[in-house]
Image (spheres, grey):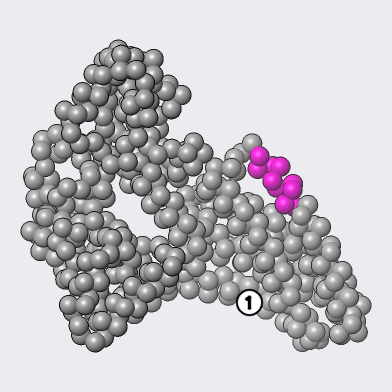
Amino acid sequence: MDALSTRKTDLGLLREALESGTLRQVRLLVHALHPAEIADLLESLPPSERAIVWDLVNDDDEGDVLLELNDEVRSGIIDEMNAADLVAATEGMDLDDLADFVADLPEAVTQQVIRSLSDQDKERLQDVLAYPEDSAGGLMNPNTISVRPDVNLEVVLRYLRILGDIPDKTDAVFVVDRHGRYLGALYMSRLVTRDPGDTVISVMDASVYPIPCESPADEVAREFSNRDLVSAPVVDAQGRLIGQITIDDVVDVIEDQAEHAVLSMAGLDEEDDMFAPVVASARRRAVWLGVNLATAFLAAAVVGQFEDTLEQVVILAVLMPVVASMGGIAGSQTLTLMIRGLALGRVEQSNTRWLMAKETAVGLLNGLAWAVVVGLVTVAFFSTWEVGLIISAAITLNLVVAAVAGITIPLILRRLRIDPALAGSVVLTTVTDVVGFVTFLGLGALFLT
């Protein structure tokens, strides 16, 4: 049985147990799950059932479960927990996870958590909190293992045995000079297979480039994907080693980006609770409904300018949606490719002009091809070659404009520091509707009235 089927089974069994009131069965089901699976189930339950299940989670698992929850669900659960339980939930957390977690805690609880740390961990936590959450510095775990290049492997092995514990997902220790500047990586595989008498500098991999602490999270994800990394060193502006990022943190980034790309198209946030109260959900969605309404009125105002033409040639009103929808679909295809290209770092100033020419040519080619089809269908159904020619011209022009808009809108929005995935579709729809209506009705007014 695959993971999705297993999850559905868990959720179904859990709901059946909740409905029957057999909390012992619910407890057994919850205790058998991984913290990530518990978090997934909590996000799939209405608030009343969510509270019951949360009370049955093992105390030792509460911190791990909270870390896996999306922001809104986590905040709701945190609001119902007392300070002592919250402090207990942070015990044993990696510092990078703790940095994410304390951002949602009440100030008084945050101070208690910080006081419970050692002086070294306090300093390291403050270092992580100093960086934006969506940067390499915000993602990193400041707990790293570093060695000097002039020691031999036997010394490194003895050092690791003395430590007794190493950070999770560690596949390499990092080599630094006496000033703490990063020099390279010593992979565990080389450490245990090479001659113990070999020096670190002769075995380390100097081609493993560090990630600057200010690098955005999406660039970090690309680096891990392109270089097939399990972990990577993070350095400050002076090249000093200050932490490491591991693959589990990058998977979270990739997952968040994927959810954001899908939900932002509808004006939604990936951190929203799908079981949030009706009023809260309605308020969030009302913003983009209002924006869409404003753009719809703009398109309606354009159509209103051709009221006399529509009264004389009713067939134009029937065919208007064809022109607008063809432009909208063509534009959304280009827009989606551009947003993906920007997210992956594949679209830059150096290739934008080439992309513009290519997408314009695609729009023109598709415009001409479908103009012939739509024109023939119009003549066949409405027996008017004049309207057939007009709608053919309007579709051709609208598809070319849609392609240009699909390229330029994301670039303009990014320059304005507006998320293209969030606002791009609304702006594009407005452009293709207005251009389509103006072109079609304008040509109709010019040649048919």
Q: Is residue 140 magenta?
A: no
Looking at the rendered image, the quarter that the N terminus falls into is: bottom left
User: Is 384 on the left or on the right of 324, as rendered?
Assistant: right
Q: Quadrant of residue 127?
A: top left
The answer to whether 326 is drawn above or below residue 137 in the figure is below
Question: Do we see residue 137 in this rendering?
Answer: no
Residue sitting nearer the eye, 342 or 120: 120
Q: Residues within 10 Å of mark 1 (few under 14, many from 20)?
A: some
Q: Residue 195: image x %, image y %?
A: 34, 17
Q: Residue at x 81, y 57 (%)?
A: 365
Count of numbered circles on the image? 1
Q: Residue at x 10, y 38 (%)?
A: 118
Question: Do we see residue 81 in this rendering?
Answer: yes
Q: Residue 132: image x %, image y %?
A: 33, 44
The answer to whether 101 is drawn above or below residue 270 in the figure is above
Q: Is residue 354 magenta?
A: yes
Looking at the rendered image, the quarter that the C terminus falls into is: bottom right
Q: Residue at x 72, y 69 (%)?
A: 326
Q: Residue 201: image x %, image y %?
A: 36, 15
Residue sitting nearer the eye, 54 or 446: 54
Q: Amino acid at mark 1?
A: Ala
Residue sitting nearer the eye, 375 or 110: 110
Residue holding disc 1: 300
Please name the predominant secondary structure of the magenta segment in the image. helix
Look at the image and give the residue range highlighted in magenta: 351-360
